[in-house]
Amino acid sequence: MKLSALGRIALATGIAVLATATVPASPAAAAPVKRKMLPVLVEFSDASFQFPDKVKASTPDTYFGAKSDSAASYLSELSRGQYTLVPAVPEQFLGPIKLDLSAAGCPQGKINQLTREELTKRGLVAGKDYESLSIVFPAQKTNCPWAGLATLPGPTTWINLYGTASGIDVVGHELGHNLGFGHQGRVKCTGGNLGACTSGGASHTTIMAGGYRPAGFSAPEMIRAGWLNGGASLKVTKSGVYTLRSLHGKGSGVRALDIALGGDRLVIEYRHAAGNFDAKLEGVHAYRVPKGSYGASSLIDTTTADKTATNNEPPNADAITKLTDRASKLSVAVVSSGGGQATVKVALNGDSLSAIGATPTKTVPPSPTASGGSPSPSPSRAPETGVETGTGAGGSEPGTEAAAGADVDASGPLAGTLPFAAGGGALLAVGAGVIVLMRRRRRSPGDPQLTAAPRHRGRGLG
């Protein structure tokens, strides 16, 4: 897909603002998913696509194309086939549909309302004929401070198109919000002491922060989606030595350790190049999950050299070697890591790490010959009521409808300024890894009322 200069800028950047509803705390129940996606191209009374034929030609590839950077391919690979996007209509999209609405003021609430009314006129029933709606409209004249917007969680995304095609860095990010993922932050824990952590920017291990498409999703997000089932996510209840396979690799085995940390959870993963993911990530990473809300996790960073999308820090710059938490009487130490497998010691209830034996405890043996093409069932999301704003090569490894009152998350560029994303109280350019100050965007009728809280909160769209 060819992009204009503005299109490339839009795909290289992202922002995020969260509204009132909270991300559900517990992972979704596992069930097969084939989600009917309906992309709809809409235009305004005073603004149309500059190259409508090119937009129409690129839309099916963006959402359902066979290449790895389509939304369908991306989510299918990440979930190991457990989550599939399928076209809701034979044409794979509808439009352009002309709305009796001015583009001025970025009226996303009204865009959503009028688009759904037009679909109803055409006999399409939300929740039956389509389950997810992605509204694509020309950016010119809207002055929207984002390239993408999405319900968190929920069925709706808005794509503010700056060129002739969007891409997975925007669409995939917004679909992650639909799945219930917020913006993943980073916490600095000096010396691995979990009792002395401060907020420190954004994670680089997921597309939901500064990781872009090649990072995929992190282990807490995969747990939230229900994609680490069949023993792939292990709840650790006793001290021992545990073996981890790479998060996005093929075959069976434990991909994540899920450990109680007071009222929170500690999730441990191992990252290594696999398929189209993690070419620039390596090592054991850890996340704090607040109150069991896996979609709101933060990367735990014990280093001084942060890995970002734009620097040359080594792939394992954010990897952990040891963590301790006196309040929870917990210790974690990495015994070995590399080549697609890691060994980790976990000491609970004040046990000594040195007293724990070297034999891995209760992990599923690796199956290098197993294929990722026959996955276990994945989660099915119940219909949501709400609205939220908002190429990398991998290596191999060894052997439902929106209503008022929902969250909204956004991503994309600000007119005349550097684009940014909000996560964990910090701001970053998702595409460029640039930290910038956030400019409060103007409100218009139907917009959520945003405040300057660490996670911007407001009312659902009308």
Image: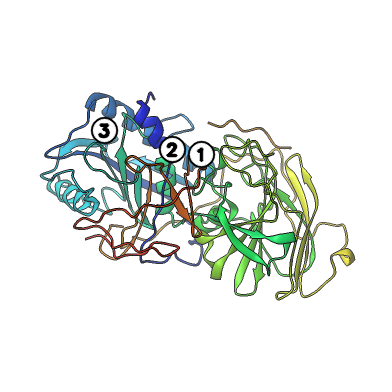
Q: Is residue 51 in view from this perspective?
A: yes
Mark 1 closeness class: few <14, some 14–19, many ≥20 residues within 10 Å: many
The amino acid marked with disc number 2 is Ile
Image side of residue 179 versus residue 339, left or right: left
Going by the image, does 125 lie left or right of 241? left
Residue 282 x %, y %: 69, 42
Q: CA distance from mark 3 to mark 2?
A: 20 Å
Label 2 environment density (alpha carbons within 10 Å; few <14, some 14–19, many ≥20): many
Q: Amino acid at mark 3?
A: Glu
- Vertical placement of 25 versus 205: above or below? below
Residue labelled with disc 2: 168
Total numbered labels: 3
Which residue bears the numbered disc 1? Answer: 213
Residue 64 visible (yes or no):
no
Task: Looking at the picture, tell me which residue is in the foreground, 194 or 58.
Answer: 194
Q: Position of residue 40 (x, y in %)?
A: 25, 40
| Callout 1 touching callout 2 (CB < 8 Å) | yes
3 or 2: tag closer to the N-terminus:
3
x and y, in percent, of residue 65 in the image:
40, 31
Q: Nearer the viewer, residue 211 or 117?
A: 211
Q: Which residue is mark 3?
A: 91
Neighbour tally class for label 3: few under 14, some 14-19, many 20 plus, Cα within 10 Å: few
In primary-sequence order, the first of circles 1 and 3 is 3
- Quadrant that contains the C terminus: bottom left
Amino acid under disc 1: Arg
Distance between the alpha carbons at the discs numbered 1 and 2: 7 Å
Q: CA distance from mark 1 to mark 3?
A: 26 Å
Q: Residue at x 67, y 67 (%)?
A: 196
Q: Are marks 1 and 3 in contact (CB under 8 Å)?
A: no
Mark 1 or mark 2, earlier in chain: 2
Q: Secondary structure at mark 2?
A: helix
